[in-house]
Amino acid sequence: MQTNPSTAVGTGITFHVAQANYYYGSFLAVSNVNLDIPERKITAFIGPSGCGKSTVLRCFNRLNDLIPGAHVEGTIQYRGVDLYDKSVDATELRRRIGMVFQKPNPFPKSIYENIAFGARINGYKGDMDELVEQSLRKAALWEEVKDKLKESGLSISGGQQQRLCIARAIAIEPEVLLMDEPCSALDPISTLRVEDLMHELKEQFTIIIVTHNMQQASRVSDMTAFYNAQATEKGGKQGYLVEYAPTQTIFNNPTEQATQDYVSGRFG
Amino acid sequence: MTATDPNAFSQSSSAEQHFSSDLSGRYRLDNIFRIASWVATVTALVVLAFLLIDVLIDGIPRLDWQFITSFPSRSAERAGILAPLVGTIWLLFVTALFAFPIGVGAGIFLEEFAGDNLFARILEVNIGNLAAVPSIIYGLLGLAVFVRVFLPITGGRTVFSAGLTLALLILPVIIVATREALRAVPSSLRQAGMALGATRWQTVREHVLPQAFPGILTGTILALSRAIGETAPLIVIGAQTFVPFVPSFRGTGFSALPIQIFNWVGRPQAEFHVNAAAGIIVLMIVLVAMNATAIYLRNRFQAEKM
């Protein structure tokens, strides 16, 4: 059912997912996912609620390890290395694969400390002031907060908080940025600022974004994966990947009827 | 205040058919419950105030410097509270010293590290049960373990043994309070820390614990307040009512305020009852001082965690 990207976009493959099934305990949450996430591109995950977009995303940095019973069968490779191999250290992996969450969640500490924390625990040896400034500049937040670095990360607006979370994530020089509906709690102007920022950041990072906003997916992403959910006998929902293709194709000329219906707003 | 008019707005006919707003009835219910909760509050306060005033009237005239700095005596006028007061402060110190780190540590382990498995659930149920065990049982445990088995370490019937026993007594309360405080910290904060490549302990120490600390402190203080009012386990451990010297950490022979009060109340002479009232006032002052310190500390931590 899945179409692999026939047009080989980008220079390489960051994540290779083949025949992956995602479980919570014995419950199969997402089945049969096949994806190749290209390097230094933005890949969007779209689909109705409960289709497993976030589950797939959260397995890329193994954050789902924190949920008891969550496990994956199949292949998920990060740059050729099996993510769930015993030799892979999840803590080190998360340093390389940053994440921005749905709700802005800065630490209840100063803006400066929000950025410095990740660097400090990972043994950053350079100049901390310099790093804080650079990270905030990259996240297009420096001009707004440079005079209040000692103030709480919670004292700034929601849009600023989300950019602070992005700054915090990129401060530790990750290779990938996972974004789980980063704009769903933001107003339209803040959303556009974050989208502009994503365009700049993709020069440096591979970005995967989960979004409910189809305009956003079509605006920012290079590749799009459409997930759907079907009701199971027990009354739960089981997600599956319907179609994965360049964003242009998904929105203008999708292979699957379900994709066509979803992107044209007929359901979901 | 002018009475509101429920018919102030022109009403749409269809809504009137579907809703009967019955405003006056709902406001009446509002009032009934406001009064009921007010009565509950006042009842509790009146009883407390009555007790307090009664004790103050009896005890205040007896409360002077001589009373605080004297050792027990057979004559009520010369008797004082110095030995039990120092004993109680010692107990408070020893109890906090052991109960706080062990209780908070166990709470952190159960909430942040243990996960949801059979072992953790068995522990959880048992800790809940331990919190309900009568204090006299802890006293017997303390007698068998700290006074007898650990005799070479604790020195027998000493402040050390009694403090350990009281620490054991309030441990479940501190563990439960710690877990509750940690549970109230949103999991998004843990995820944020872990997603940056922090280990679990780094996340807990830097972000979760500071958020939970005021709650942990409140729970600990409530537990300690309970500990210093305890009498039964101290009797079993061997607290005395006639200690004519300042008790030391591992010296045999110590007293505590509740024990002394209990003893004075039980005497036939009315003068000793006055002493008991004054002793209660001293105990309350210690309690209030302790709570005040705790509230001060808590507010400082709250101001720090923005």
Image (cartoon, coloured by chain):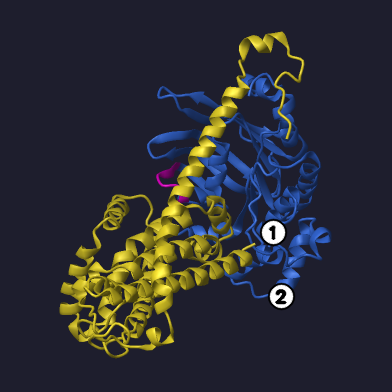
Q: What residue appears at the point 43 percent right and 39 percent down from the top-left corner? A: A24
How packed mark 2 is, by other alpha carbons closer than 10 Å (few <14, some 14-19, many 20 or more), is few
Q: What residue appears at the point 20 percent right and 75 percent down from the top-left corner? A: B237
What amino acid is at disc 1? Gly
Q: Which mark is residue B191?
A: none
Residue B85 x/y as whole percent: 36, 80
| Colour used to depict chain A in the structure image | blue
Residue B44 x/y as whole percent: 43, 51
Which residue is label 2 attached to? Answer: A127
Q: Quadrant of residue B260?
A: bottom left
Which residue is label 1 attached to? Answer: A153
Residue B182 x/y as whole percent: 47, 57
Question: In the picture shown, does residue B174 fall above or below A181?
Answer: below
Which is nearer the N-term, disc 2 or disc 1? 2
Marked residue chain, label 1: A
What amino acid is at disc 2? Asp
Could you say which chain is coloured yellow in the image? B
Q: In the figure, is residue A111 to the left or right of B52?
A: right
- In the picture, the quarter occupied by the N terminus of chain A is top right
Q: Which secondary structure lies at badge 1?
A: loop
> Which segment did they paint magenta?
A66-73
Q: Quadrant of residue A245?
A: top right
Residue B71 x/y as whole percent: 31, 88
Q: What residue appears at the point 53 percent right and 40 percent down from the top-left corner? A: A55
Q: Nearer the viewer, residue A258 or B77?
A: B77
Count of labels shown? 2
Viewer-nearest of labels 2 and 1? 1
Alpha carbon separation for disc pair 2 and 1: 21 Å
Q: Which secondary structure lies at badge 2?
A: loop
